[in-house]
């Protein structure tokens, strides 16, 4: 009857049809993602013997170190061997971390792979991620109470994860950025605002009668302009006095080996370095000074950066010292990026990956190879004819149908083998 919908049509609406190509493509995509995250880490040996690893996949064990206890992180191999049945938080990757598994933070567990560990790893850095909490909202991910679809983005400096809506600046719609620096880290490393005006994916600029940065409101912005070509007057405005030569010495004298935590002291530190470069006449060799001589703005917002933006950072002696005191020297290391880690994982996995079919064929004699190829061609032909029936009838292939096909195929194969006659000369 015209316009009538048969059972096959109704069934196809209820059960979406997925092609084998779709399944294989999805499987390959998942495999590539796993290779990217895990490929650069050793899945069999504890990474403790390597010291503080530049970047590796990390986990936190909620079973062994629940909230309220000291935070701890474990390497990929220990997550498999020592915590296989435990509740783990996947931390993606962290930089300069040494595996804690079995040390003094684990009261009732000894590492099976590398038990001889120091009591603590003083060089490790921890945050709320190690208890399964992320962003400024301190919520888990995925969050069962959050009904708003939102992606999580990792800050390249503090390595915390943030909801896109909690960054003060909407992520570029195209997603065409490589790294993000969160609001707090932009405030702590305020020298980056001068670079953001030129390098950020969403330009942060005071030129052309307005801001290109997509942020609600304009009351919190500061436009920094040089006056009469005087470079010293183009510094970022902070709630601290502008230090002269004596102030430079005073700021330096108050420094300790620990990175600054106060935004005002960090701003004074960066201003002091700027004045020091002026007094030593080294400003012509400093990219940062050249950028700070131009108009730029500072906002309470995150920034988004393109591929290879780090290579544009100044590496003069004074800037390198500033990076060290702010504990961000890693920004000048091209191998520190997550992209570099992922690419290494993909390359390592590709080198180790073998084709099982080709390995099997290479281990066979020529006669066995011919027989296997014939069997494969028979299987392909019969499977194609079998699936064509479903396509012609407009019905969905179920698991039971595939099982039935292989049972019948094996039965036919046994009958062929049993019916063979062998002759000896």
Image (cartoon, helix red, strand yellow):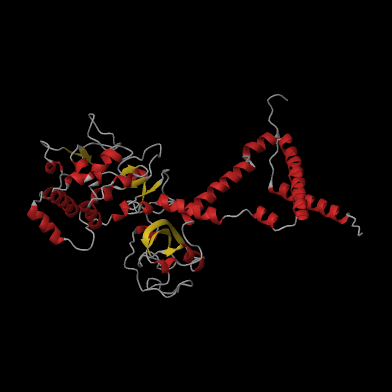
Which residue of the protein is positioned furthest toward the top in this rendering?
2
Q: Residue at position x 26%, y 39% from top?
A: 197
Above or below for 28 versus 116: above
Q: Is residue 45 visible?
A: yes
Q: Residue at x 35, y 67 (%)?
A: 70
User: Is residue 85 toward the left or the right of residue 9 in the image?
Assistant: left
Asked whether, in this view, residue 287 is left or right of residue 352, the answer is left
| Residue 262 position in % (x across, y down) | 20, 55
User: Closest to the observer: 188 or 196?
Assistant: 196
Q: Where the C terminus falls, by quadrant?
A: bottom right
Classify residue 397 by image quadrant. top right
Query: Front-most of 232 and 296?
Result: 232
Q: Position of residue 73 (x, y in %)?
A: 40, 64
Along the viewing direction, whichever of 92 and 114 lies nearer the viewer: 114
Q: Is residue 299 visible?
A: no
- In the displayed structure, 167 sits above or below 208; it is below
Residue 253, position as x, y percentages in the image: 13, 61
User: For the image shown, how many numbered marks are present on the structure?
Assistant: 0
User: Which residue lies at the image location 11% right of the left edge and 57% below the top edge?
Assistant: 249
**Quarter of the figure with the N terminus:** top right
Residue at (36% x, 51% y) in the render: 334
Q: Position of residue 148 (x, y in %)?
A: 41, 43
């Amino acid at each position: 009857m015209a316009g009538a919908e048969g059972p096959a049509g109704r069934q196809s609406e209820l059960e979406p049809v997925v092609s084998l190509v779709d399944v294989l493509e999805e499987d390959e995509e998942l495999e590539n993602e796993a290779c990217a995250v895990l490929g650069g880490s050793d899945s069999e040996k504890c990474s403790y013997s390597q010291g503080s690893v530049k970047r590796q996949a990390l986990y936190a064990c909620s079973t062994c170190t629940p909230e309220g206890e000291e935070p701890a992180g474990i390497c990929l191999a220990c997550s498999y061997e020592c915590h296989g049945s435990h509740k783990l938080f996947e931390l993606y990757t962290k930089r300069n971390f040494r595996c804690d598994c079995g040390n003094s933070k684990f009261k009732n567990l000894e590492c099976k792979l590398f038990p001889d560990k120091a009591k603590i790893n003083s060089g490790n850095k921890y945050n709320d991620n190690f208890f399964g909490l992320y962003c400024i909202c301190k919520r888990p991910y995925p969050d069962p109470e959050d009904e708003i679809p939102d992606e999580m983005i990792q800050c390249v400096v503090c390595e915390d994860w943030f909801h896109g809506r909690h960054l003060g600046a909407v992520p570029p719609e195209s997603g065409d950025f490589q790294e993000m620096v969160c609001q707090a880290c932009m405030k702590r490393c305020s020298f980056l605002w001068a670079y953001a005006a030129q390098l950020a994916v969403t330009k942060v600029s005071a030129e052309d009668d307005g801001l290109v940065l997509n942020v609600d409101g304009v009351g919190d912005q500061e436009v920094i302009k040089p006056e009469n070509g005087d470079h010293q007057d183009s510094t970022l405005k902070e709630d601290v006095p502008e230090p002269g030569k004596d102030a430079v010495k005073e700021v330096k004298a108050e420094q300790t080996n620990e990175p600054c935590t106060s935004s005002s002291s960090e701003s004074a530190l960066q201003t002091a370095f700027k004045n020091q470069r002026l007094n030593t006449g080294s400003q012509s060799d400093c990219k940062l000074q050249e950028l700070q001589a131009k108009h730029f703005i500072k906002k309470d917002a995150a920034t988004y950066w393109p591929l290879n933006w780090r290579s544009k950072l100044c590496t003069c002696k004074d800037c390198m010292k500033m990076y060290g005191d702010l504990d961000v020297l890693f920004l000048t290391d091209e191998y520190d990026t997550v992209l570099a880690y992922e690419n290494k994982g993909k390359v390592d996995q590709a080198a180790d990956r073998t084709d099982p079919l080709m390995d099997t064929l290479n281990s066979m004699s020529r006669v066995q190879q011919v027989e296997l190829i014939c069997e494969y061609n028979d299987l392909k032909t019969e499977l194609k004819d079998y699936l064509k029936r479903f396509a012609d009838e407009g019905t969905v292939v179920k698991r039971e149908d595939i099982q039935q096909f292989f049972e019948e195929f094996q039965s036919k194969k046994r009958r062929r083998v049993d019916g063979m006659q062998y002759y000896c000369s």
